[in-house]
Image (cartoon, rainbow, N blue to C red):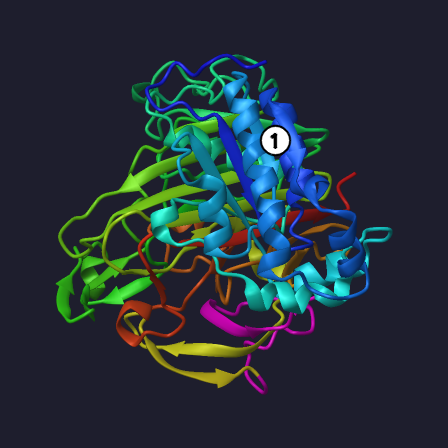
Amino acid sequence: MAREDATGDPQRLVLVVGVAGSGKSTVGHLLAERLGWTYQDADAFHSEADRAKMAAGHALTDSDREPWLAAIAAWMDQVTEAGERAVVACSALRRAYRDKLLAGRPDAVLVYLHGSGELLASRLASRHGHFFPAALLDSQLAVLQEPEPDEHPLVVGIDQSPEAVVTAVLSLMRGRSDAGVPVDGTDTERPVHALVSERSSAASSPTGGSWRLVRGVQSVEVVQLGGGLRAYEVNGRPLLDGFSTGDAVTGGRGQLLVPWPNRVGDGRYRFDGRDLRLPLNEVEKGNAIHGLLRWTLWEPLARTDDSVTLGTTLCPQPGYPFLLDVRVEYRLGPDGLRTAVRATNTGTDPAPYGAGQHPYLTVGTDRVDSAVLTVPARNLLRTDDRGLPIGQEPVDGTPYDFRTARPIGDLRLDTAFTGLDRDPDGRAIVRLAHPSGQRGVDLWLGEGTHWVQVYTGDTLAEPERRRRGVAVEAMSCPPDAFRSGTDLIVLQPGATHVLRWGLSPWGYS
């Protein structure tokens, strides 16, 4: 049994909620194992009559659920009175249900597993032998009242492995702990390492501490400055045109772009009735570029051999008077590197928001001219000489149509694309291939990505770095979204946005 936390805010209960297909039972069980806590599934408290009713395709009513919720609450009290800690998985779709389970339990943590209807339906369609039929999903979504800010939910997307979901939950729980120690006060959460950098101090490098992730023949290096991505290698071959250990970051290499990607013209925008002005850091063009967190030292929150989560707080400041908690997780899997950028509005006012990341891909060619590029996009954004939007147009008939793979040649690209065609998993795949066709790397664009910027580096300040790699930037919105409003996210207080992208190498084994 896990002992009491060493913090002033002990966490004794975790309630994992979500609709059918969200994986709450699997996640709840894995979370309890990682913590060494007791686990219980709320389904165990359903009566036989309730089970039979759902199996017949009929949704439960509130009167059906009342004794069920009372039984769960009684079990939670019994466990905590015995001095134990517990994880409970329960649908708890309505606010009233969650209030019944959490009222009077200030030491409880609410975890909400969020996923799209399409993903939930596909999961239920592949599930067999469960009393809850897939046909009832629509009734659950109709009933669902997503947790509100005053419930202080930890929101985690489900379009990743259960193990990754659990690591994200643990990271968020740790962030809620006053002292930043493991939530159970012990070392029972074995896969998560001590949260220290692998450099002795931030002062020893211009990019602060760093973390090396390894899985099989893959290795990644993440740096503390801006939470950025320095290197990714497979079998010793670099797939990123990154930067050397001990060097400063130039050209935005691997940097996170928060709370906006690309540019804001003149740094001026109007939001929620206020005229705001951001600092101009692309002075020669009169733009604010690439957000506010590139030169901030991010803190490590969770660490395993093949993953790391870093986080920082974006505090209110001139031009952006909003408060955000921002986290990035890098994780190596069997198919490559997965990245998730999460921002939660922890302030009291709605906040304008966008996100992106700026890796440069390479397939080992001296210049990008001979590399073969595929971009599954139907539209491009025309821009002026300041990099600001003029208008969208179809790629048909333009030199920028890369829907069919072809060499880049001498084409200069600094182009935003949208209208992305996606595979059955909801991913748009940008591919950079070696001229031989024998190897390459796919950059996939997942949840929260509506745009991609492709840049061949022709205007980089260092001539020797130009056209050595192709920047393929996952973006939630286009350039100047703070002024145009195009795909701009308005983060309500307590709301979280997730941007997912990743790299899948091929031909390197």
Snapshot quadrant of residue 219: top right
Q: Can the viewer see residue 18?
A: no
Whether residue 66 appears in magenta in the rendering, the answer is: no
Name the foreground residue: 413 vs 20: 20
The secondary structure that most of the magenta stretch takes on is loop
Residue 458 lies, with reference to residue 162, above or below; the image says: below
Residue at 31% across, 77% down: 384
Q: In which quarter of the image is the C terminus?
A: top right
Residue 63 lies, with reference to residue 155, above or below; the image says: below
Q: Quadrant of the N terminus?
A: top right
Q: Where is residue 376 in the image (x, y as percent from the top left)?
A: 63, 70
Name the foreground residue: 17 vs 226: 17
Q: Position of residue 313 (x, y in %)?
A: 29, 40
Q: Name the residue under label 1.
A: 31
Report the side of 321 relative to 457 (left or right): left
Residue at 48% across, 57% down: 146
Snapshot quadrant of residue 215: top right
**Residue numbers of the magenta segment:** 396-425
Label 1 neighbourhood size at 10 Å, few (<14), some (14-19), many (20+)?
many
Q: Position of residue 353 (x, y in %)?
A: 33, 59
Amino acid on which disc 1 is placed: Leu
Residue 480 lies, with reference to residue 248, above or below; the image says: below
Q: Is mark 1 on a helix, strand or loop?
A: helix
Whether residue 419 appears in magenta in the rendering, the answer is: yes
Report the side of 131 relative to 458 (left or right): right
Q: Where is residue 170 in the image (x, y as percent from the top left)?
A: 51, 31
Q: How many labels does the image show?
A: 1
Report the side of 475 relative to 68 (left or right): left
Residue at 41% across, 45% down: 255
